[in-house]
Amino acid sequence: MTVVTPTGEVPNDYVRIESADDLTTVQGPLLAPLALAGAAVEARRNDRLGLSVANDTKVDAIAPFFDAIDLIAVEFPSFSDGRGLSLAKRLRRAGFAGRLRASGPLIADQFAEALACGFDEIQLPETMAARQPVAQWLAAKDIVTEHYQSGYGADRSILQKRLAARKG
Amino acid sequence: MYRYDEFDERFVRERVQQFRTQVERRLDGSLSDDEFKPLRLKNGLYLQLHAYMLRIAVPYGTLNGKQLRQLALIGERYDKGYGHFTTRQNLQFNWPQLKDVPDILDLLADVEMHCIQTSGNCIRNVTADQFAGIAKDEVEDPRPTAELLRQWSSLHPEFAWLPRKFKIAVTGAEHDRAAIKVHDIGLKVRRHPDTGATGYQVVVGGGLGRTPMIGKVIRDFLPKDELLAYLEAVMRVYNAEGRRDNKYKARVKILVHEIGTEEFVRRVEAEYAQLDGPTVNAPESEVARIARYFAPPAYEALPEDSAVLDAARRADPALDAFVAQNGFAHRQPGYLALTISLKPVGGVPGDMTSEQMRAFADIAERYSFDELRVTHAQNLVLPHVRKDDVPRVFEALKAAGLATANSGLVTDIIACPGMDYCALATARSIPIAQEIAKSFADERRQAEIGPLQIKISGCINACGHHHVGHIGILGLEKSGKENYQITLGGDATEAAALGERLGPGIDAEAVPGAIETIVGTYLKVRTDGEAFIDTVRRAGLDPFKASFDAYVAGEPA
């Protein structure tokens, strides 16, 4: 699995677990499914904890764990399913300040969209990463430099820039 | 009309470059065909029956002469010398080569045009009343709203991978010429009955296709400055909750239908309550900046009536018929809007040759403040013609083969491309339209029949809007043969209604005769001055069914 951030590829330091048994056997940072969130927090491990959530999860089901986790991986079943983008937007609005990861077979052309909706990084299956090297992701991210929509991404929208220019 | 500033210009250029790299990455194998498909669709590029088709956005149907000339050039250089205007005010080229598309996009960008979101599961090109800024029944010009939405929806980061396509239409008038009740979102500019403030009535969940539905009002009055934040709430609810398990149940109309209007409203309002509106909405001065581009042109102060035109009409019955049929009352005294029919008898509805485009660009530049419009009925409009100039304009239109006096009449037929072009079609549409038009070719007879909209779709996806045709014709395939179902009573205006089936499906050859039968029944049943649709509403389907059944059974009328 390859993890792409706006500055390039980073190592994936979270190990995905599937059952409660893994909480004691697996070392290092864990990525647990939401169903195991309670047990994972209970286990009071000293390592970092991430939660993997389906893209139709309600924010209310995740929010109670915000303080105990430092990563949420929103699962994208396919690149053409945009639900994860709205979930990211809602998670940020609800105050989640940790790492937000889009996980699944996304394409480089979606990098800018994912970042604008609040994601920090993309975790790709190896087959996708092999076809679309990180350089393509970085290039695709910057090809359209401005956006019209206010409230997306760190920089100002075209509408806000026009306003600022008028005010001089 | 709106002009690009440096931001718009750069945005569209970068979008062209983005598409160029997407094509390259498809060719070098970085993108699979499945991955490339939605990317090309979002840039208006379809793979049709015989070739690629490129759909060019004509935002809310406004064009100037320079733009139309550029379309003429593209049609000549990269197509077969013509283009095709669609029911969503866009223009399609049916024969471009994939390798030429990025160059075509550059040519479009040179005249402030693009193909952004003319297809794909995203917010499509926004449409509006073709008589915006002209109609006397207008509360406010819908074009500034439509332009704001064009910008806001362009490459929206969150709403580019929706369950299905999403169409928005805007009207600012009392009489709905933009069919807002059969769009995913319809907006009607209105004034608050108590405060007089401007806002929108918001209609959601209309649509045609396999499951036609009339939209539901979800906000009776949305303050004007809250538009973008409120639409963001609607789109987020749809993006998160619209069905993705079945593409035929994925439009927002199905979500609204399945959970009910009340529950849909509850979810939208709950989302809206959590949104930080001021961080989303357009700054007031930006809305005002856009609106200034749509200020009325520099009209001359003229008397309402033109002696020149009156005399010319008396002298030339053809001109008289043209003005009576294709003229539209202008709010500015001494001016007239003219609908230019792209439905000559025997022609392909919506087609225009490059030569005609150039001739028409000349006319628009000289006589209509360099402005023209595209209508959802696949016609064009010269929005601001001095009445004194109308005789000269008529002569110029005649010379270009653009003076067909049939606007709104039985031969002004909307038809999808059908099996002549479309990979989805199950039957032909264009030849059916041509045969019906030939059957009713006599202009005097057409005028005698009066307003009657025939709409033809070549498959159940309903691109020809047959559900809302006064007479709707749906082409299907039945045991290897084309079969046509006929509906009556559809209406796309503020009195929106879906047509009802008249009887069993019939063969292609029988369609013109069936339309003759329906019209014959109407002429018998109508009261003085009663339009076709009103007769159907008053008399119901029974008299029409009876004569249709007799026709199908082969009995003499």
Image (spheres, rainbow, N blue to C red):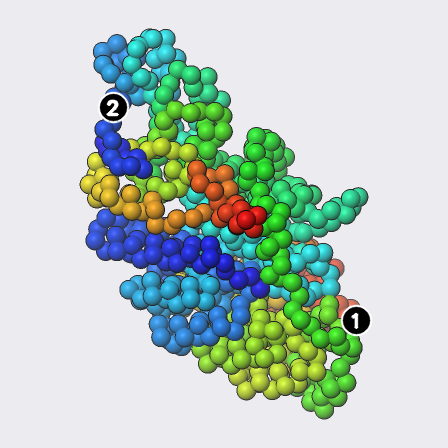
- Label 1 crowd (10 A; few <14 / some 14-19 / many >=20): few
Residue B16, image quadrant: bottom left
Query: Which residue is under mark 1?
Result: B528
Q: Chain of mark 2?
A: A
Residue in the image at 44% along x and 71% along y: B71
Rendered-image quadrant of the C terminus of chain B:
bottom right
The residues tagged by marks 2 and 1 sit, at their Cα atoms, a distance apart of 81 Å
Query: Residue type at mark 1?
Result: Asp
Residue A164 lies, with reference to residue B481, above or below; the image says: above
> What percent of the width, then of the height, locates residue B269?
61, 34
Residue lying furthest front in this view? A168
Residue B445 lies, with reference to residue A68, above or below; the image says: below
Left-right relation of B231 to A95: right
Query: Residue type at mark 2?
Result: Asp
Rendered-image quadrant of the N terminus of chain B:
bottom right
Residue in the image at 53% along x and 83% along y: B401
Query: Which residue is under mark 2?
Result: A13
Residue in the image at 56% along x and 51% along y: A166
> What percent of the width, then of the height, locates residue B63?
53, 68
Q: State whether discs 2 and 1 lie on one chain.
A: no
Q: Chain of mark 1?
A: B
> What percent of the width, then of the height, locates residue B426?
42, 61
